[in-house]
Image (cartoon, helix red, strand yellow):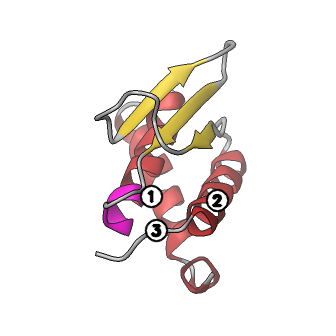
Amino acid sequence: MSTITAVEFSRAARTLAAAARHGGWEPPTFLSPPRVRDAQRTVRRRSPGSAVVAVRIRDRPWSAVLGDLVEGVVVANRLEGAEADRCRDALWAAVAEPEARAA
């Protein structure tokens, strides 16, 4: 398993935040690592409509980290059902684009 760098994490977070904004969802703030010792992902609510998604990147596959970032946006926006699926689809499409993968 390769190590994920802070630069890769930041690039993915920026890409997902832009995709969330484009889709009409509120992008959370992304951080790493979570404050909770053994947690892989946490979501903290700040002011109304604002959330912090913290994801552990150390010793984890890139796909798991991306999955946690995507789900963090869904949870932070309190999405369910078809709207949650639309959000996931849009976010995964954003990180699957060639420039996102090559970066």
Q: Secondary structure at mark 3?
A: loop
Q: Nearer the viewer, mark 3 or mark 1?
A: 3
Give me the C-alpha separation between circle 3 and circle 2. Answer: 10 Å
Q: Name the amino acid, label 3.
A: Ile
- 3 or 1: tag closer to the N-terminus: 3
Total numbered circles: 3
Q: Position of residue 84 (x, y in %)?
A: 42, 40
| Image position of 59 (left or right of 12) | left
Front residue of this view, candidates 21 and 12: 12
- 2 or 1: tag closer to the N-terminus: 2
Report the magenta residues as a range. Answer: 60-65
| Image position of 72 (left or right of 31) | left
Residue at numbered disc 1: 89
The C terminus: image quadrant:
bottom right
Q: Is residue 103 above or below residue 70?
A: below
Residue at numbered disc 3: 4
Does residue 46 belong to the magenta stretch? no
Q: Residue furthest front?
A: 37
Q: Residue at x 52, y 40 (%)?
A: 73
Residue 78 in view of the camera: no
Residue at numbered disc 2: 10
Q: Nearer the viewer, mark 3 or mark 2?
A: 3
